[in-house]
Amino acid sequence: MNPRLDALQPYPFEKLARLVADVTPNPDRSPISLAIGEPQHPPAACARTALVEHLDGIAHYPPTRGGPALREAISDWLINRFNVPAQWIDPERHILPAAGTREALFSFAQALIDDRASPTPRVAMPNPGYQIYEGAALLAGAQPLYLPCLPETGFLADLDAPSAADWDRVQLLYLCSPGNPTGAVADLDYFKQALALADRHDFVIASDECYSEIYPDESAPPPGLLQAAAETGRDDFSRCVVFHSLSKRSNLPGLRSGFVAGDARVLADFVRYRTYHGATLGAHVQAASIAAWRDEAHVRANRDRYREKYDAVMPRLAPFCDVARPAGAFYLWPAFDADDEALTVAALRDENLRVVPGRYLAREVNGVNPGRGRLRLSLVADTGGCVEAVERLARVCEARTL
């Protein structure tokens, strides 16, 4: 077996399962889970209809690049959403459909990293962050470079933390905005700073924007990397690759549909890799995806539901922890005056409530784990369930202070 597999750390939910393996949930409470970030809102109806209407497509092999209609729908969406000049995007060269962002984010590093480099190449990533970035780096033969996401940087990955020598070894920088688990949103100046670093130190930016369509203010959608490229006149999207998904935007996590877009030179090599990797979208999935990307009404309704939940939850949560309403995504990242593992165990044992210890989503660097003392709460239950969950958590915290 590949010895690099031994470097992989257990996934957060594997750690969580071990932590609570011997815990008996309170049988007097119905179970509520705010642990897994799986949307519970109704899937986009337009996508469901298109999926059923195109089931005959399963009789045919799909092309690696996806069909032209899907690439055009994605291109139109990018142009409208991120103010990218229409003449800059060629659906044939700049767009690549993918089976969700998870597999694309992982496989991208396998295609990009040159593990022959000496010293060992590095992949920079937010800490805390999505563990796929770390696994992708390790299996590609690179070393992770963890960028702290702390309150003093607005929970954005600190681009000033590494030395110039560290950046010189970086071949790939993963960014995530809005962030998981912090909900932090990068502004255009932040993306431009990342682009300047990429030019100076010769690396590619992989911007994970799968939460970009969940935000509180309809007049201020989160910007993206391609938008920053457009503002700086980078019409070839050099060093810029973005990843988007229908999982959160359209409540279609089981459809496994997303896309990669940006630097045509980089994507050409990525397509070559994916010819062998084989993660393509069937015709029925493509039809559902086209319908979803071309409809915004269900996305606005989705945001309304999350906005309602945050409005209901924040006043109840704030009195017993340090928490701020995030600028995007559907998580809360509260800090407690308690051990996050102990709090997780108590929540399940006493209230039948599942949450994730913050330390499981981060890595300890120089003796500091930025997730310690925090929980990740995924506001995926309905509003009543989220309110009940926070009230249960309040009881747990109150009991621990008596």
Image (tube, rainbow, N blue to C red):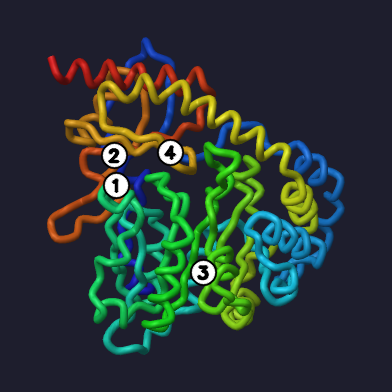
Q: Position of residue 30 (x, y in %)?
A: 43, 16
For disc 1, the marked residue is 360
Name the residue located 21 percent from the left edge and 43 percent from the top edge.
372
Q: Position of residue 383 (x, y in %)?
A: 52, 22
**Sequence-first tag of 1 and 4:** 4
How crowded pointer 1 is (Cα within 10 Å; few <14, some 14-19, many 20+) is rated as: many
82, 130: nearer the viewer: 82
Secondary structure type for disc 2: strand
258, 309: nearer the viewer: 309
Q: For the residue marked with disc 1, what is the amino acid?
A: Tyr
Q: CA distance from mark 4 to mark 2?
A: 13 Å
Q: For the residue marked with disc 4, what is the amino acid?
A: Tyr
Q: Which mark is residue 357?
A: 2
Q: Is the residue under label 3 in contact with that under label 2 (CB below 8 Å)?
A: no
Q: Position of residue 324 (x, y in %)?
A: 35, 35
For disc 4, the marked residue is 331
Residue pushed farthest top? 28
Residue 390 location, quadrant: top left
How crowded pointer 4 is (Cα within 10 Å; few <14, some 14-19, many 20+) is rated as: many
Q: For the residue marked with disc 2, what is the amino acid?
A: Pro
Q: Which mark is residue 180?
A: none
For disc 3, the marked residue is 107
Secondary structure type for disc 3: helix
